[in-house]
Amino acid sequence: MLDTDGRLFANLFTIEEAQKIETDPILAERLDAFVSRFGRLQDTVGDKLLPALLSALAETIGPAIDNLDKAEKFRFIESADGWMEMRRLRNQMVHEYIEDMVVLSSALRNGHAFVPSLVAAARQCVAEVERLLNAPS
């Protein structure tokens, strides 16, 4: 995720950059890789890892927003509201073909802004799993 993010956003992703997607196959592949990896990491952490981790901590698993509130309480994520915004953005980037270059470039820049939080959440969850696995029985 970080490598893909770095390659796509080596420069500020502008409307002019977005317009090059149709004629620049390398840029198009970087965009596809970013959207795919962003969505996959967000799905993996939010839909799989967080519920499994909460369950391992003997927390009741509930609706996604309740799980996110618990994850925020345990400091696995920075903010449940921020995670929901990230989820909306993920859905926009993954499920909607964005033809408006202003909307596309804005969505990508917003996704780029969320990468540090997303990666930090994944790392925090992995660290907690490792802590639990290494805890004395």
Image: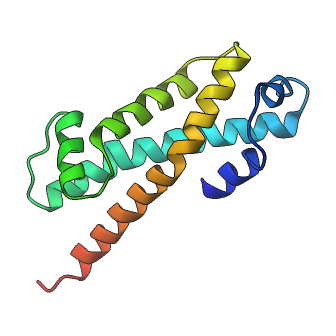
Residue 72: % across, % down: 24, 50
- Residue ID at (72%, 46%): 9
Quarter occupied by residue 65: top left
Return the x and y of residue 42 as percentages of the image width and height: 44, 43
Q: Is residue 21 above or below residue 117?
A: above
Q: Is residue 97 above or below residue 124?
A: above
Give residue 40's position: percent from left, percent from top: 50, 43
Residue 24 locus on image (x, y percent): 89, 32
**Is residue 4 left or right of 11 when viewed as pictured?**
left
Q: Residue at x 23, y 35 (%)?
A: 64
**Which quadrant, please, contains the C terminus?**
bottom left
Q: Nearer the viewer, residue 137 or 89?
A: 89
Q: Nearer the viewer, residue 74 or 23?
A: 74
Residue 34 in which image quadrant: top right
At horizontal 34% and vertical 71% (from top left) the residue drawn is: 127
Q: Nearer the viewer, residue 15 or 65?
A: 15
